[in-house]
Image (tube, rainbow, N blue to C red):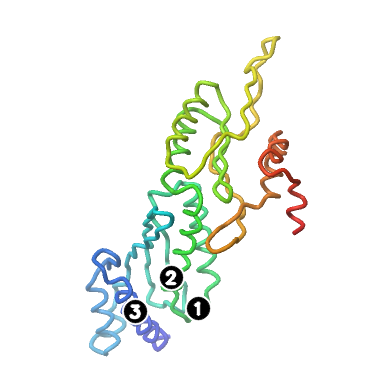
Amino acid sequence: MTSQKLEGLELQLAEVDMLTSMYANPGELILDDPTALELIRAVVSGNLALEELESRLGFIIKVCVENDGKSLTVELVCNLPHEYPFVRPQIFTRAPDITRERHKQLREELNKEIENQETGEIIVGVVVEWLKRALVHRTTVLGVKPRKEILDWGHELGLRGFCLPGKPGIICAEGATSDVDEFWYRVRNLKWKRISIKEHEVVPMVTPDGQKVSQKMDPFCELLLDARGGKGREYHMDLGQFSTYLQQHGCGHVFNLFFGLDARHEDGD
């Protein structure tokens, strides 16, 4: 076990040296405790007994991506046990500019990616590259900041509906006319290449006999559906899932307004 730990520490040093050369700009890679790196070097060189080593390597890598003139920075927090890479590293993200729902999904996907990596191999560099691709995916349609603002406005105005990133990006808002109008006013003033209203329906909120009309949608949220790769860095929503979602909420007719086809045919491609 001691020899394996020493081998692991040697690999950790090699990985950190590689990462510091790749992320050499100030603030790109920040060590939690620079002395820990020197203590591990001392152990590997034989100047310090392994049993005396208590410190572990920890660092933060600031991963930045740009897409369509928008930039996004996510912090990748890495903590390496002495046994790494023969055990899994502890890695998670900090992303204040991403919505809570989207960040939760990103973390789940990150954990799956880490689990898919083989033990015995250094993986932090691989995880960084995976994260860059994942972030490009998420900024392709409906940028991170507009999506967060849309979600916040939906909650503030007490709306129901969803914001669906993808190709195409779709927003649905349900609520009192004055609140929906205010929401639309704010949304259309964001920077869009193109945005338009596909369907606008006004219904009474109370029936003639005084009964309150039930709303169709769930409280406003970011709708997360599986995406499929397109050309280059484009990602497209799963039309079948979207059609099913609309049907479950009594809005199946809206699908044809957007796409003019039956999603079941799309699933059969």
Q: Using a 10 Å C-alpha cutoff, classify the residue at mark 3 as few (fewer than 14 neighbours), some (14 to 19) or many (20 or more).
A: few
- Mark 2 = which residue? 89
Spatial separation of the CA atoms under disc 3 and disc 1: 19 Å
Disc 1 on helix, strand or loop? Answer: loop
Is 20 displayed left or right of 147 in the figure?
A: left
Q: Amino acid at mark 2?
A: Pro
Spatial separation of the CA atoms under disc 2 and disc 3: 17 Å
Q: Amino acid at mark 1?
A: Thr
Q: Nearer the viewer, mark 2 or mark 3?
A: 3
Q: Residue at x 52, y 26 (%)?
A: 180
Relative to 171, is 61 above or below? Answer: below
Q: Amino acid at mark 3?
A: Met
Is 125 displayed left or right of 28 in the figure?
A: right
Relative to 120, is 208 above or below? Answer: above
Q: Residue at x 27, y 68 (%)?
A: 31
Residues marked 2 and 3 touching at CB (< 8 Å)? no
Can you give x and y, in whole percent of width and height, for residue 109 in the image?
Answer: 53, 60
Can you give x and y, in whole percent of width and height, for residue 170 in the image?
Answer: 57, 42
Residues marked 3 and 1 touching at CB (< 8 Å)? no
> How many numbered badges does the structure rendering display?
3
Which of pointers 2 and 3 lies earlier in the amino acid sequence? Answer: 3
Which of pointers 3 and 1 lies earlier in the amino acid sequence? Answer: 3
The numbered dot on residue 119 is 1
Spatial separation of the CA atoms under disc 1 and disc 2: 10 Å
Q: Residue at x 31, y 83 (%)?
A: 50
Which of pointers 1 and 2 lies earlier in the amino acid sequence? Answer: 2
Residues marked 1 and 2 touching at CB (< 8 Å)? no
Quarter residue 8 falls in: bottom left
- Farthest top residue? 209
- Residue nearest the viewer, comparing 103 with 193: 193
- Mark 3 = which residue? 18
Is 51 displayed left or right of 182 in the figure?
A: left
